[in-house]
Amino acid sequence: MTNDISKRLFPTTTRRQLLAGAAALGTASLFPVVAWADGGRLNVRAYLEPDDYDPLDASGFLEELLYGCIYRKLIQYVPGDQWDWQLDLAESIEQSSPTTIAFTLKPGQMWSDGFGEITAEDVKFSLERHMVDENNSRIRPDLGTFTHVEVTGTHSGIIHMERPFAPIWTIALPYLAGTIICKEAVEAAGGKITTAIPPAVCGPYRVVEHRLGERWVLERNPDFSGEPADFERVDLVVIVDESAAEIAKEAGDVDFTSIGPASVARLGDNPPDGSRLQVHPALFYHWVGLNVQNPKFADERVRMAIMHAIDVPSIVQAAFFDVAEPATGIIAPGLIGHRPETIIPPQADFARARALLDEAGIDRLEINIDVLNTVIHTTAAQVMQATMAQAGIDLSISVHESGSFWSLGVAADGERWQDLELTIKRFSMTPDPYYATAWFVTEQIGDWNWEQFSNEEFDRLHDEALSETDPAQRDEMYRRMQDLMEESGGYRFITHGVTANLFADSIVPATRPDGLPLVQFFRRA
Amino acid sequence: MSAFRHTLMGRLLADPLAVFAMAIIALLVVSALLADVIAPHDPSAMNLADRFASPSATYWMGTDNLGRDTFSRLLQGGRIALYVALTAVSIAGLIGLILGMLAGFGPRWLDNALLFFFDTLRAYPTIILALALAALMPRGLGTVIIVVVITSFAEYGRVVRTQTLSLKNAEFILAERAMGASFARIVFHHILPNVLGPFFILAAMNLPVVITIEAGMSFLGIGVPPGTPSWGATLKDGFDYIRTTPWILLSGGLPLILATLGFTFLGEALRDQLDPRLRKTR
């Protein structure tokens, strides 16, 4: 009977064939490794999902993660520990005068999908559309005093600025606003890139699929004119929660993710097998913002009482597990404009807060704080709630998911922005202080300036500093601007945090000095 | 004494499952009512020096990420859970009772309309409806209660309607009508007492469901505001730090399990005692 079954299962199998089959199976099991080495697939966690592929709608690094893979710029950041740039589309680029930059494109750089060669007209189109009011570009401030591009040839042009603009080399050209898109393809699409797949790309990868709320599937761009990307396929996997992202990393679902401070404190020098952990000082800034235009806070003593009642070290300890330091402003250490200390000490002074409320004739103050539904910000809010009660301030907490939260202070999204009280936010940052202060000028009220802070001296300094070429002078100006912010009673700076990346040791990640990934430069180990 | 044995309570006390259920419920109710007295610590008091403390004589169920005593927070959370459950079930039950009797006793068109209404609501996934409503309304216990009421009253309405329909043409009701009994007399003296049995069984069975919905909404961040001690919020805190401090999650789950067991067993015991068909088979 046994022999019958054996014969039915292996009708013509001899012992030698069985051994050969086993050997073949063993060899076959190596194929995934071989396949990885031969092209491979990379899964990178994305913490949010951009609305579309149009730089006009970009807001920060979440778009840059994707755009960096599919688009190019004249120059790009160099991965590593120093803030520097390298040539990308540009063959040469130089400051020809304080207000002009001459560039020449590398010839033969191609758009995908048959849209031909990348020309200076594409550069002109890409940069100038941010300056058109009707386009409502949210990153227009990135371009500062830029006015237009003068096309001098198929591959050459001159970037013109109204006045000297110091951050053009550190923000405008190598970051979001410097993204070059295909003029012909975008115009054919009606002037905006709102298609499910971008009509034309020029980066090392192209989008082959977008599964809403789940992932972008990118593949090596066959029309890419530079050195081919190291991975055959890159998936940008959308995982909002950092704890979930860490679990996904350990399960092998992603190869690279940032992790939260709690995990940094837990993992320390012992990351999981097959993984590496790198911790970078971040440029982000987390802060508690107070809407200074809200009638409830019209009395400066009330605003100052709230500021004195917020205990920054407790928030950093509880929400950031002491892996970060309290911030002194919106500009991180090492950058021009970093302040050595705050005006109001980071430690709360409940007696002073109470005294200020008494002077203002307030017994108990009931206020609300709106926060994003992240562990860090909800924890920070709870710490504030517990500590501020000591000064007679009852803080209620409203938690929002991402979409709802980021529309709270936007005038175009409803009336709520005028009634905001307190918020906790985190903004991304680039290595120039201009990028930090740009969001708090008067004209940003109703867009990014949720504190509705409006100060003539601040606006003037911001305007002057972007053209100031003396680093010492700029340093002084940005310090003063942060003093003004703090003196308004609208800002309590929390921390810059850290960027901690957990990644598979089978890849060599490329990051900016602040730890944010430049996926287009990732390589296999 | 003999008469007591034949009352509902007497019969329940003779049922070990019912006694076990009532003991659990009594424990939860008493601990919630006396939370302020029993709690060894202020449930909102933050103590960062002691955060993530393991269970000990000082902190029976350890502490959370802000150093708050988990046991004290669970006691307070019980108060919230029972408040939400009892309030929501009472309101939903009352609405369901009225609409169900209207559907069963009213004209055909009204029955059809209400039935369509009940089935539409019941077909909508609870959590999706909760997310939608939570996005439109301010966060808080009121919103949680409204979500639960909206998602659950149709079930009561359905049960009450079925009972009413079965009684509507019963001989004793027809006899009452023939003798000229008023509508109110028929409803309050005959229909209502007869539908209350299944109604209470359903209510008892629904209480743990409501408690779970409240916990689920708080876990998802659309229930009670952060900082409020609730079982769902404790579960969420535990989930965030499950790798280092699993006891927060375990502690948060314990009262939920007890509440579910207690109310479900009580519901089953009530069903056994109130459903004549089941009583005959025992």
Image (cartoon, rainbow, N blue to C red):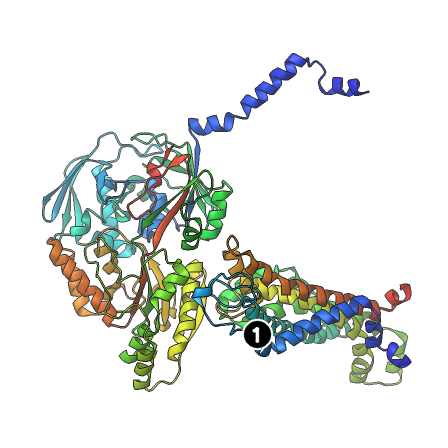
In this rendering, would A147 be left or right of B85? Answer: left
Q: Nearer the viewer, residue B266 or A347?
A: A347
Label 1: which residue?
B39
Residue that protrudes farthest toward the bottom in the picture: A361
- The spot of residue A449 in percent (x, y) is 29, 64
> Looking at the image, which residue is at 63% across and 67% down?
B211
- What residue lies at 37% left-to-right and 58% top-to-bottom? A322
Badge 1: chain ID: B
Above or below, B270 relative to B236: below
User: x, y percentage for residue A353?
Assistant: 32, 78
**Residue placed at 38% from the left, 41% from the top?**
A198
Q: Nearer the viewer, residue B22 or A200?
A: B22
User: Picture quarter containing residue B212?
Assistant: bottom right
Q: Which quarter of the rendered picture does the C terminus of chain B lie within?
A: bottom right
The amino acid type found where label 1 is placed reads Ala
* Vertical order, A489 against A131 (above or below): below
Question: SS class of the residue under badge 1?
Answer: loop
Q: Position of residue A397 (x, y in %)?
A: 44, 70
